[in-house]
Amino acid sequence: MEKLHGNTVSEQLQEIEQIKKVRELAGKLKDIKIALLTTITATGKPHSRPMYTFELKDDGIIWMFISRESRKVKEIEANPEVVLNYSNPTHDLYVTINGRAEISNNPTKVEELWSDRFKAWFPYGKDDPNLCLLKITPEEAEYWDSPDLLLAQIVNLVKNTFSGNAYIEGENKKIDFTKPDAAPASRPENAQGISVEKREL
């Protein structure tokens, strides 16, 4: 776990709750390496492209390697609001993240994340003058996650057929990183401060 920085017990408890939320999200993203990064162009239109992402740590920051000469650098400098979309169709899992992006030149982080696989894009390695980092701080995330086993879906369908209830397929959760203790009043909240809404057909 990340070192806690709060000066009071209350602040440290809030940090712990935030870390719980990050781990909830990280658990969904752990098997997905490619995300669609959407930025806003100079003409106000959304522009998306696939990007390789790294493991989400307890600090909640999403990192990517990018080229200084790429169009997205100018787009982010003009408008730091971005959207990331992840999908794992095999397990019927879909995640979207809204956040703020910034360009970083942190050499320590480059050293930590670098692998020779990236030489295909940055031939001079981690010292490539065209290499920089994209740092994304999530503000809100939402995911849709359905049972990945056909048997579980069949059992759920049969149970709800006999009970007369609507068939419920998986969960739809929103995670607010900007307000650790806040949740919409119309939705139930679990112990981690994550609002929960069952997805229905």
Image (spheres, grey):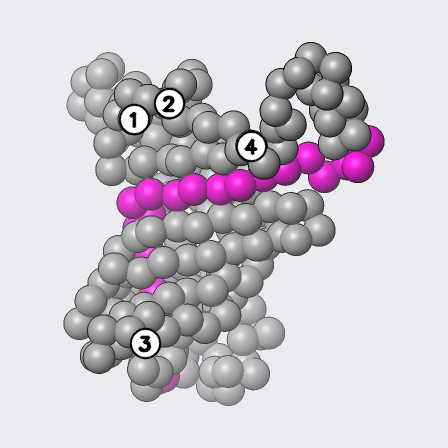
Q: Amino acid at mark 3?
A: Lys
| Residue at point 29%, 45% (across, down) | 139
Q: Looking at the image, do the residues carrying marks 2 and 1 touch, with CB atoms under 8 Å apart? A: yes
Q: Earlier in the sequence, mark 2 or mark 4?
A: 2
Q: CA distance from mark 4 to mark 3?
A: 37 Å
Q: Position of residue 93 (x, y in %)?
A: 60, 46
Q: Residue at label 1?
A: 184
Q: Magenta residues?
A: 130-152
Quadrant placement of the N terminus: top left
Q: Residue at label 3?
A: 72
Q: Is 64 drawn above or below residue 155 in the view shown?
A: below
In this view, the residue in front, 158 or 68, is 158
Q: Position of residue 185 (x, y in %)?
A: 29, 21
Residue 150 among magenta residues: yes
Q: CA distance from mark 2 to mark 4?
A: 15 Å
Q: Looking at the image, do the residues carrying marks 1 and 3 touch, with CB atoms under 8 Å apart? A: no
In this view, the residue in front, 146 or 16, is 146
Q: Amino acid at mark 2?
A: Arg
Residue 10 among magenta residues: no
Q: Is 32 drawn above or below residue 57 in the view shown?
A: below
Q: CA distance from mark 1 to mark 3?
A: 33 Å
Q: Secondary structure at mark 3?
A: helix
Q: Residues within 10 Å of mark 3 (few under 14, many from 20)?
A: many
Quadrant placement of the C terminus: top right
Instruction: Please tell me the numbered disc located at residue 187.
Output: 2
Q: Amino acid at mark 4?
A: Glu
Dominant SS of magenta comes to strand
Q: Secondary structure at mark 4?
A: strand
Q: Is 117 drawn above or below residue 104 in the view shown?
A: below
Q: Looking at the image, do the residues carrying marks 2 and 3 touch, with CB atoms under 8 Å apart? A: no
